[in-house]
Image (cartoon, rainbow, N blue to C red):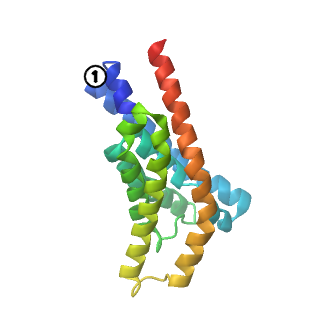
Amino acid sequence: MFENVLTQNNVTFKMKVTYKTIISASLIVLAVILPQIVHAALGQPGGVKWLPMYLPVLLAGCLLGLRWGLAVGILSPLVSFAITSAMGSAMPAAARLPFMILELAVFAAVSGLFTKLISKNGLWAFPAVISAQVAGRLVFLLAVVICQSFVPFTPQVIRGQIVTGLAGLGVQAVLAPVIMIGLRALMKKDKND
């Protein structure tokens, strides 16, 4: 979506990269900060329930497209892990990190596939987010099943996390598209001014 706005405004390639880098970095920062806020307010169970890192990643995919969204999806848990490990309490936990990277990469990539459609009609953000959530969760489950012989996750633990996270996914299935519709309207308004 953002690419279309930049192209319509005749922004140079170098400036497009600069703008996308700034937005990507901002979304990664948000993906690191939101879980800290949720964990401080609600504890570790709050993070499992509300999945705060997922929202910025979904926004990155919808806004920036597949490649840039994918970068945000991969880097968000890595940056969070690096920063929080240095602070003494890794988030996500080391055992969960590879699975979360994979899951968030799928979230971003699938939502990023809808970018051009969202640019034309903001309502496409709803199927973009829901498709991304379903695909990401399925890939996460598949990865756990494939790796279950050497990871500390049991099917019961994963099932519990998925059921607990339904509340966060539900909120994000509404919130992310509403934010995208608002951003789209704002970008269209700026273009018309």
Rendered view: 5 above or below 76:
above
Question: Circle 1 sits on which residue?
Answer: 12
Q: Quadrant of residue 145?
A: bottom left
Which residue is at a point 70% across and 58% down the rendered structure image? 40
Taking depth in this image into account, of 83 and 125 the one nearest to the observer is 125
Instruction: Tell whether 14 sits left or right of 177.
Output: left
Rendered view: 124 above or below 14:
below
Kind of element beneath mark 1: loop
Query: Looking at the picture, how far across and down is residue 174, in whole percent?
Result: 59, 47
Rendered view: 4 above or below 127:
above
Q: Quadrant of residue 52?
A: bottom right
Taking depth in this image into account, of 4 and 29 the one nearest to the observer is 4
Residue 74 visible to an observer of this rendering:
yes
Taking depth in this image into account, of 141 and 25 the one nearest to the observer is 141
Query: Looking at the picture, how far across and down is residue 118, in whole percent?
Result: 42, 37
Residue 79 visible to an observer of this rendering:
no
The mark total stands at 1
Query: Looking at the picture, how far across and down is residue 129, in whole percent?
Result: 48, 50
The furthest residue to the top: 193
User: What kind of residue is marked 1?
Assistant: Thr
Instruction: Tell whether 69 sits left or right of 163.
Output: left
* Classed neighbour count for the residue bearing mark 1: other residues with Cα under 10 Å, few (<14), some (14–19), many (≥20): few
Which residue is at a point 41% across and 46% down the rendered structure image? 61
Instruction: Tell whether 47 sits left or right of 107.
Output: right
Which residue is at a point 47% across and 71% down the rendered structure image? 96
Taking depth in this image into account, of 47 and 190 the one nearest to the observer is 190
Q: Quadrant of residue 114?
A: top left
Which residue is at a point 38% across and 74% down the rendered structure image? 143
